[in-house]
Amino acid sequence: MGFQETFKALSDPTRREILHILRDGAKTAGEIGSHFTMTGATMSHHLAVLREAGLVTDDKRGKWIYYELNLSVLDEITGWIAGLRGESSDEK
Amino acid sequence: MGFQETFKALSDPTRREILHILRDGAKTAGEIGSHFTMTGATMSHHLAVLREAGLVTDDKRGKWIYYELNLSVLDEITGWIAGLRGESSDEK
DNA sequence: TCATTATTTAGAATTTCATCTAAATATCGT
DNA sequence: ACGATATTTAGATGAAATTCTAAATAATGA
């Protein structure tokens, strides 16, 4: 994983909004997509970026794939930021 | 400003390392650049991106331009992440 | 004022990214 | 097995980002 993929994933407004939508629980790709005007293929791409960054997990149940927020990666981000404040940290 | 520029700025490893280098105080563009192999022009570009995102401030003193970390923007990031944990926040 | 040093700006080359359309895969219900 | 639905994959396109070289700007010191 690493900060590279995480920050890249967070650098797109659509993807940040997706995370926001997932605050109150898992949703299917379709439900998430219904908040946007882009095609399903584009949504699928964004969800893949978020998944590869570890920011969401996916869970296939029958016909649907449920996406859910994964907060632990965000903890690493807050940790990295804390490291900038003096507690010396190694990660770049 | 806004999250767009901030996350974009943080999504590049060189720029994250620059922030790290600035942990222990302001440094000139040249001092910062000496940690990397890229040209001064490229460094200047990265510093401009960080400045536009509000992550650093610059202070011209004679021949040199000192760059310094600005932590307040990073507070907004931690706030945004906290908002993902339930405290409903509006920003995307 | 002239040469030198520090840094930025301009413009070009290459790569990466967001998005689309079309096609593929998988599952469900009949 | 068939048709409909949910989602992904493949391939293309245009826009944005990173990096470079070369030129410009600004400040210093002789």
Image (cartoon, coloured by chain):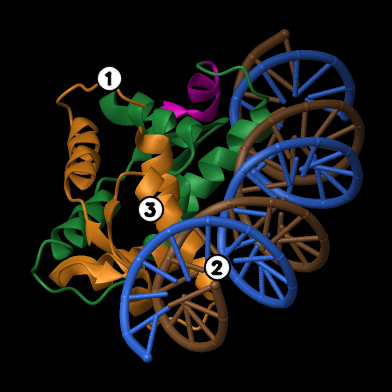
Chain colours: A orange, B green, C blue, D brown
The residue identified by callout 3 is: A50
Residue A71 magenta-drawn? no
Report if residue B7 is visible in the image: no
The disc numbered 3 marks a residue on which chain? A
State which quarter of the image contains the C terminus of chain A. Answer: top left
Distance Cα–Cα, label 2 vs label 1: 38 Å
Neighbor class of circle 2 (other Cα within 10 Å; few <14, some 14-19, many 20+) is few
Give the magenta-colored segment's residue range. B27-34
The disc at residue A41 is: 2
Cα–Cα span, label 3 and label 1? 24 Å
Q: Earlier in the sequence, mark 2 or mark 3?
A: 2
Q: With respect to residue D30, does A5 lie above or below?
A: below
Disc 1: CA contacts within 10 A as few (<14), some (14-19) or many (>=20) = few
Q: Residue D11 at x, y = what percent?
A: 77, 54
The circle drawn on residue A90 is 1
Vertical arrangement, residue D24 with respect to residue A2, above or below: below
- Where residue A9 appears, as percent x and y from the top left, is 42, 51
Q: Quadrant of residue C21?
A: bottom right
On screen, residue C6 versus residue B70, left or right, reads: right
Q: Secondary structure at mark 3?
A: helix
Q: Earlier in the sequence, mark 3 or mark 1?
A: 3
The residue closer to the viewer here, B5 or D8, is D8
Q: Which residue shows up at 16% across the image and 65% down it?
A: B83
Residue in front for this viewpoint, B29 or A27:
A27
